[in-house]
């Protein structure tokens, strides 16, 4: 996602060196001189290219070939070793122009956690997930109303057991709030066997979630004054 939203692209030139080109999005169209009527503000385009040239010049390059009409800046002497420095310079420039300037990770792997209702999470529907800013009462309320993998009645649950694979309380403990794999295996087996009821599973989740959130709120309050130490100067 970060790479797709970057304002500048960096790639190998067909001959030699590296090419820097603009990546126009809705968020940066105005900055890059793209007018709503489809016309181009050449002065803004030239200003952006001048800024790119200045950023590259600061890195020590002197053979910079700026071609706004072609839509790129060519640096013939740049090598693969220069990519890292150039990319960071372009990210800094992006932030100065109003963009996020995020460096894309090498790769990420995800296993999506189900929402509190058993469906997808949505920031526009607060009941579907837990937010880091939720107070403890809200956390408890959401968990107690969460989708359950238990049976409709206690008798049926004792007889047939529950399904922790779809039980939100268990899933949230597994993904977020319980680090002891042996304990998770124990309550998983108890739930499947009908020994642990759905309400009891939710209460276990409430206890761990509220403790986790309490610790988070406390640590956030204690370290709020350190946030700026980890931000680039132009993003504070």
Image (cartoon, rainbow, N blue to C red):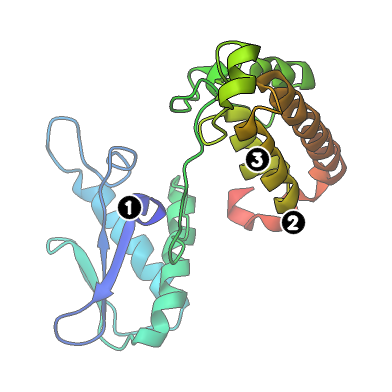
- Provide residue 159's location: percent of width, then percent of height: 60, 22
Q: Quadrant of residue 41?
A: top left
Q: Nearer the viewer, mark 2 or mark 1?
A: 1
Disc number lying in front (3 or 2): 3
For the residues labelled 3 and 1, the Cα–Cα distance comes to 44 Å
Q: Is residue 69 left or right of residue 184?
A: left
Say which label, 3 or 1, has the lower sequence index.
1
Residue receiving disc 3 = 189
Quick one: label 2, few (<14), some, or many (20+) residues within 10 Å? Answer: few
Q: Residues within 10 Å of mark 1 (few under 14, many from 20)?
A: few
* 10 up-or-down from 225: above or below: below
* Among the two numbered marks 3 and 2 on one chain, the one whose residue lies closer to the N terminus: 3
Farthest front residue?
159
Which residue is tagged 2? 229
According to the picture, the residue beneath numbered tag 1 turns out to be 4
From the viewer's perspective, is residue 225 above or below residue 211? Answer: below
Q: Secondary structure at mark 1?
A: helix
Secondary structure category for the residue under label 3: helix
């Amino acid at each position: 996602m970060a790479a797709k939203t970057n304002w500048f692209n960096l790639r190998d030139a067909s001959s030699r060196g590296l090419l820097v080109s603009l990546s126009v999005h809705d968020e940066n169209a105005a900055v890059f001189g793209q007018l709503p009527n489809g016309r181009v503000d050449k002065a803004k385009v030239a200003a952006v290219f001048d800024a790119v040239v200045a950023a590259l010049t600061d890195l020590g390059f002197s053979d910079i070939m700026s071609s706004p009409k072609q839509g790129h800046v060519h640096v013939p002497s740049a090598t693969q070793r220069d990519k890292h420095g150039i990319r960071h310079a372009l990210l800094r420039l992006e932030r100065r122009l109003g963009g996020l300037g995020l460096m894309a990770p090498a790769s990420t792997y995800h296993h999506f956690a189900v929402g509190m209702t058993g469906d997808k999470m949505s920031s526009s529907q607060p009941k579907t997930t837990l937010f880091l800013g939720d107070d403890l009462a809200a956390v408890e309320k959401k968990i107690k109303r969460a989708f359950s993998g238990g049976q409709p009645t206690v008798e049926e649950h004792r007889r047939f057991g529950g399904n922790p694979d779809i039980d939100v309380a268990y899933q949230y403990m597994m993904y977020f709030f319980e680090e002891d794999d042996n304990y998770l295996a124990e309550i998983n087996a108890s739930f499947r066997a009908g020994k642990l009821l759905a309400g009891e599973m939710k209460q276990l989740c409430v206890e761990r979630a509220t403790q986790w959130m309490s610790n988070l709120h406390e640590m956030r309050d204690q370290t709020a004054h350190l946030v700026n130490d980890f931000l680039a100067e132009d993003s504070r």
